[in-house]
């Protein structure tokens, strides 16, 4: 069943009212995920590749089923980051200090062979 235009407008306005809270919780989650993503561990690999996929999906494809290997808190943080990045005002790497350097490190650590810049 399709929504009417007025229902779609209402949904968009409701989303905009929640947007700042989504950004706040998403940034908190992103910072937690980055600390794991730069570690040479299994969860670090999954999170690093997830973040690279958000940064540039065509260049760094990510299999969503890999998220099943994360503990619940990290999985939920990935969802928070996805919610924040649904309608991005800026690129994901621009949301954190030294984002360009952090993402360069993620590329060096986790980019699939042949996809490294």
Image: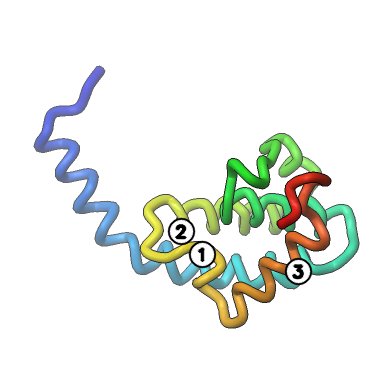
Residue nearest the viewer, comparing 2 with 85? 85
Lower sequence index among marks 1 and 3 = 1
Mark on residue 26? 1
The residue to which callout 2 is attached is: 84
Tell me the residue at 29%/53% (across/down): 15
Residue density around tag 1, few if under 14, some if 14–19, many if 20 or more, within 10 Å: many
Tell me the residue at 74%/47% (across/down): 115
Lower sequence index among marks 3 and 2 = 2
Residue density around tag 2, few if under 14, some if 14–19, many if 20 or more, within 10 Å: many
Q: Are marks 2 and 1 in contact (CB under 8 Å)?
A: yes
Q: Name the image colouring.
A: rainbow
> Where is residue 83 drawn, in percent x and y?
47, 53
> Where is residue 21 drawn, in percent x and y?
39, 67
Q: Is residue 24 visible?
A: yes
The residue to which callout 3 is attached is: 105
Tell me the residue at 57%/82% (across/down): 97
Nearer mark to the viewer, of 1 and 3? 3
Lower sequence index among marks 2 and 1 = 1
Q: Is residue 71 visible?
A: no
Secondary element type, mark 2: helix
Residue nearest the viewer, comparing 60 with 74? 60
Quadrant for the N terminus, please: top left
Secondary element type, mark 3: helix
């Amino acid at each position: 069943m399709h929504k009417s235009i007025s229902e779609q407008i209402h949904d968009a306005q409701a989303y905009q009212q929640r947007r700042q809270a989504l950004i706040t919780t998403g940034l908190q989650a992103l910072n937690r995920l980055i600390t794991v993503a730069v570690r040479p561990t299994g969860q670090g690999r999954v999170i690093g590749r997830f973040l690279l996929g958000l940064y540039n999906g065509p260049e760094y494809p990510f299999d969503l089923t890999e998220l099943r290997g994360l503990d619940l808190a990290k999985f939920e943080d990935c969802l928070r980051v996805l919610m924040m990045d649904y309608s991005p005002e800026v690129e994901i790497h621009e949301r954190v200090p030294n984002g360009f350097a952090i993402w360069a490190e993620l590329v060096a650590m986790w980019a699939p062979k042949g996809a490294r810049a």
